[in-house]
Amino acid sequence: MKKLIAACFCLCLCFTAFGASFMDIAAAETTGTEVPAEEMTPEELFQTGRAAFDAEDYGKAMEYFQLAADAGNAEGWRGIGNLYADGFGVEQDSGRALEYYQMAAELGDAKAFYNIGTMYKYDMGEEQDTGKAIEYYLKSGELGFADAYTMLASIYQYGDGVEQDIGKAVEYYQKAADLGDASACYSLGAMYYSGEGVERDYGK
């Protein structure tokens, strides 16, 4: 289970999440002509950086993420954090990744809160602290990122760094399911099937 969660985190860092819909890449170039950066909106700057990331042009990704961030786009700060977290185009530096995630979080980016929580959960540049991880996952979930609630549910279901609490696990799986997370729906179904922490209900 822990390996699965860790794998999901890596996917989030690479812009395909940890329920995240990062596959809708917006192309920054059309008919071979690139729109000048000064004519782009902050979101377009970020999308251009993201397209460059997918093309493994990490220098360009960094350039456009920085432009987006400077223009007030929270995802731009998170994008820079992702590059440092995985060491794409720069030397891997978890400390700097955390700094950029915090900048994104200050602008209300739900996935940045999630990534910070995961860094604390798995001792990625920060001392492992499940309490802080839960704090950041909760904020991420409250901002609408379903995967954060799924992570919280798993923590409580398996007593991973906290006292096991099946009631809380069900609560957070339900919150994630309400936000459309498929894995949370599956986990809830399995719990109702087996009667784990809830009354067995084959209909549910």
Image (cartoon, rainbow, N blue to C red):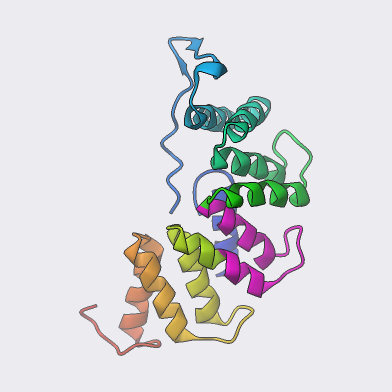
Q: Residue 90 vs residue 148: left or right?
A: right
- What is the tally of numbered marks visible in this picture? 0
Q: In x, y percent, where is residue 173?
A: 40, 72
Q: In x, y percent, where is residue 74?
A: 56, 42
128 in magenta: yes
Above-or-below relation of 168 to 1: below
Say which residue appears at 46% left-offset and 42% top-offset: 22
Q: In x, y percent, where is residue 116?
A: 64, 58
Say which residue appears at 54% left-offset and 86% top-offset: 164
Say which residue appears at 69% left-offset and 45% top-offset: 86
Q: In x, y percent, where is residue 128?
A: 73, 69
65 in magenta: no
Quarter of the picture containing the N terminus is: bottom right
Q: Is residue 2 visible?
A: no
Quarter of the picture containing the C terminus is: bottom left
Say which residue appears at 39% left-offset and 66% top-offset: 176
Above-or-below relation of 190 to 109: below
> What range of the chain is rendered magenta?
110-136
Where residue 170 sits, quadrant-wise, is bottom left
